[in-house]
Amino acid sequence: MKRASWALRAISLLAACAGCVSCTFIEPAEPPPGTVHLTAAALATSFPGDLRTPPDKVLSELPALTWTPVTLPHSLPRAVMGGGSDPFQMETMTVWYRMQVPAAQVTPQITDLYLPRWHTWGHLRIYANRELIYSSMEEGIFAAFNDPLQVRLPADVSATRRPLELLVRIDCVRATGGALSTVWIGSGTAMRSMFDKRRLLQNLVPQITSSIFLVLGLFALGLWARRRRETTQLLFFVLSVLFYVRNLHYYIPDPSLPEAWFSWLQVNSVGWLDVVTYFFALRLFDLRHRIFERILLGAMIAASIVTLPLGLIQNNLAVLGPLAYLVFTAVSLVVAIMVTVTSVRLRSAEGGVLAVILWLNLGLGVHDWMLQNWRTDIESIYMLPIGVVALFAMFLATLVRRYAAALSASEKASSLLEAKLSERERELHESYDKLREIEQASLLSQERQRLMREMHDGLGSALMSSLVAVERGQMASADIVQVLRECVDDLKLTIDSLEPVGDDLLILLATLRYRLEGRLEAAGIKLEWNVNPVPSLPWLNPTLSLHILRIVQEILTNVLKHARAKTIRLAATHDDTHISIAVEDDGVGFDVDQAAHSGRGLANLRQRAALLNALLQFESRPGGGTRVCLRLPIATADCSQS
């Protein structure tokens, strides 16, 4: 368990590092054949912007603007100003990017346009040869920052083989600015490949990881509900909820919450992640820094209250977000330093791993802050959602370690009890061995007596009565053969009852079929076997097995002797409480009431059924065939062993 825990930590670190490296290989460094990568454009800006007017389907002419060459990716500066959280009440601007693709590069393979990233709080519109091919206005106004985009170019772009003019219009709030990545055009397959890779890392990975850890957090919450002293499990649950809330904006660009409240959740969830991580680290070392804990907790509560979108502070959300992230980064730095110092002082390997992960995430957080403020390549990936996976894996490994430690403590406690019981167990084993010998001897004696009783009452009685009749000349040869055949069958049944069939009735019936099917065929009687799977009988033993065999054998023998039947149908079915064995023939039938008073045959059958705690039913009439049903209980309190 300990090795698995350390392996989980190592894998988490490798996964985070691999994520950092893999994000640089989404788009190829050099455009493949048939693909054009646009890294330059002409820029024009006008004030104010227009967030209300629907886009023109076709642009007749562009407004008279001053165009300036720029390099893509390109970001627009933010303007520090108020205006509230309603973009229609804030100052806006319209930005145009114009790109030209020579006719020689417009090949028939070029069908799609791909944007790795675009950032705006407003609208994005894209025109190809003045024809509108995409507008975000239909999706409403939201702070788009993390979604790649793939759109279809007009069908006649490559057919005309003329230069392609691309126009990108961004209408945005000046306080948030805007940004545009480089532009790719090429085949739909090539663009889809790049789009899927980027969407996986930018949208799906945060969604998948946050959902997985939320489920694990709910599991930890259930454990904490059973053991309230295990505060680490409660902290793990809180971390999973904060991580889930934090990642929502990566894959839900337009939440149902108002923009101001959604931004408040995103900003404060980062700070609370730092605070809860620090508390988890303290519990990991079994330490308490009460003064610093109270300061940190009080400051975070105050920050969450102050930033509530209820007062004047909401007028500067564009500045508040980056500033808050900068403060939280400083808090993360303090937490990482304290965890590192504590782990070194206590020589804790587990604390050292946690410190490395915290420093890794601190670096990723700085990268994401720079990306948010366009201080680095805007085509980079937000790495903190990937790096935090290592932190959660560390927490999960710690919970696994503590669970293993609890199991170890339980095993030690039980070993003490085992040591006290070991001597008693040895004495009991000796007693059990003696009892087993006595029991085996008793079982052998009982089985010997049973066989002797069966041989005396059944086979022995039949042979003695037949012998007397033969000596007196009262039996014909055919009668002697019949008696001997019945004696042989009776002997075989007695032997079959000794077979280890356990509680399986089907094996018992199959054995009987094997013994009697030849006699039925010789008599010209067709046997229809309709035995379905039935439940096992826990009370079945050799004595009771023999009773069942004798009942069914007697029924079949009576059919052979008296019914003059052509067909015998044997069926086995069951319900919730009983198993039914039904034997039905198409013979001459008989009067059940008269037969019950004229001989011992039916009485003997009912007596055997009573020993089984079973019910034996007869249905017959002269000329109409006979049906005999034996209903055996599936579970019975006791059965006679006679």
Image (spheres, grey):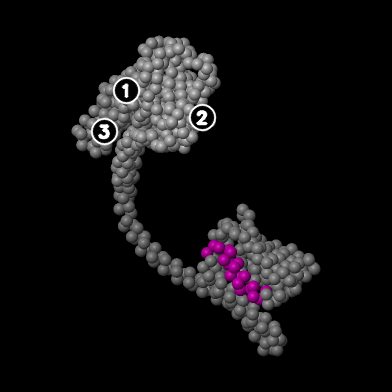
Q: Are marks 1 and 3 in contact (CB under 8 Å)?
A: no
Judge from the rendering whether residue 174 lies leftward or rightward of residue 59; answer left or right: left
Callout 2: SS: helix
Between 337 and 151, which is closer to the camera in this rendering? Answer: 151
Q: Mark 2 or 3, which is nearer the eye?
A: 2
Q: Amino acid at mark 1?
A: Arg
Q: Which of the 4 image quarters holds residue 438? A: bottom left
The residue at 70%/62% (across/down) is 617
The residue to which callout 3 is attached is: 355
Between 179 and 577, which is closer to the camera in this rendering? Answer: 179
The residue at 32%/22% (across/down) is 375
Spatial CA distance of label 1 from label 3 is 27 Å
Instruction: Provide residue 180's location: percent of width, then percent of height.
Output: 40, 23
Judge from the rendering whether residue 309 lies leftward or rightward of residue 538; answer left or right: left
Q: Which mark is residue 160?
A: 2
Q: Which residues are magenta?
A: 502-520
Q: Mark 1 or 3, which is nearer the eye?
A: 1
First in sequence: mark 2 vs mark 3: 2
Callout 3: SS: helix
Q: Is residue 213 magenta?
A: no
Placement of 159 over or under 622, stated as above or below: above
Q: Mark 2 or 1, which is nearer the eye?
A: 2
The residue to which callout 1 is attached is: 375
